[in-house]
Image (cartoon, grey):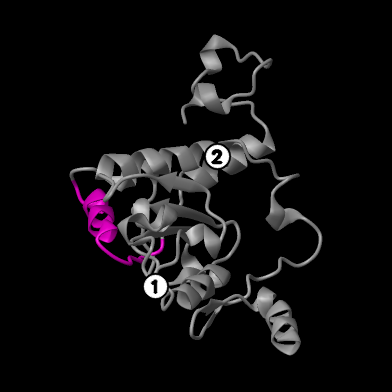
Amino acid sequence: MDSKELNSPGYGIPPEMQGAVSITTLDRIYNWGRRSSVWPMMFGLACCAIEMICTAASRYDLSRFGMEVMRPSPRQSDLMLVSGTVTKKMAPTIVRLYNQMPEPKYVIAMGACASGGGPFKEGYNVVSGVDKLIPVDVYIPGCPPTPQALLNGLIKLQEKIDKQSIKQVRWYQKGALEAIPIPLLGPDLIRQQDLPNIKKAAEEA
């Protein structure tokens, strides 16, 4: 974001001070700082992770966007890049990692498998999209997506951050944020929210 985008419209800056002074809002300066320092979690599930690694290499240079610092801990991460097939075995771990990330946090579903199951959608062990487990901010199509597609998805995430307001974002609202219940891995994937209905159906059977 350059100084023209950072400045609030309607406030003129004398020509001799342009480039040295900016008049902006709290939302714009806050979002400008966050969009330029999104730290992804070092986390890959399948073949899409290879494309994610390529994007972090010198040819595509994620550091242009302030996103080159991939953290090995969810406690230090802002972005979960779900790159690969989401299996039912991995589902509890994905939700657990998401819950451990501090707010504000974002999720990108990279590739066909993470977005909707991909070619393995009908598999007995595959979740049809990570959005069945956690909220997703940006979907990137492809099998696998190219590094250019991932860069485009990251730019779309930056555009979403630019539009957020401190007054409306969930992490500044009153009250504690509820963690997403970790699904149980049994004969099939069981969401904890569904347990009362399952017990009731078992009693009626």
Numbered circle sitting on residue 124:
1
Q: Position of residue 55 (x, y in %)?
A: 26, 49
Residue at 28% of width from left, 46% of height from top?
Answer: 145
Is 12 situated above or below 31? Answer: above
Residue 5 visible within the image: yes
Task: Check if mark 1's residue and mark 2's residue have beta carbons within 8 Å.
Answer: no
Looking at this view, is 25 or 80 the one in front? 80
Residue 20 visible within the image: no
Crowding at dot 2, Cα within 10 Å, few <14 / some 14-19 / many 20+, comes out as some
Is 198 situated above or below 61? Answer: below
Magenta residue span: 41-58
Numbered circle sitting on residue 160:
2
Looking at this view, is 193 or 42 the one in front? 193
- The answer to whether residue 51 is magenta is yes
Q: Position of residue 151 (x, y in %)?
A: 34, 41
Q: Position of residue 182 (x, y in %)?
A: 58, 77
Label 1 vs 2, first from the N-terminus: 1
C-alpha span from label 1 to label 2: 35 Å
Amino acid type at circle 2 is: Lys
Is 23 situated above or below 204? Answer: above
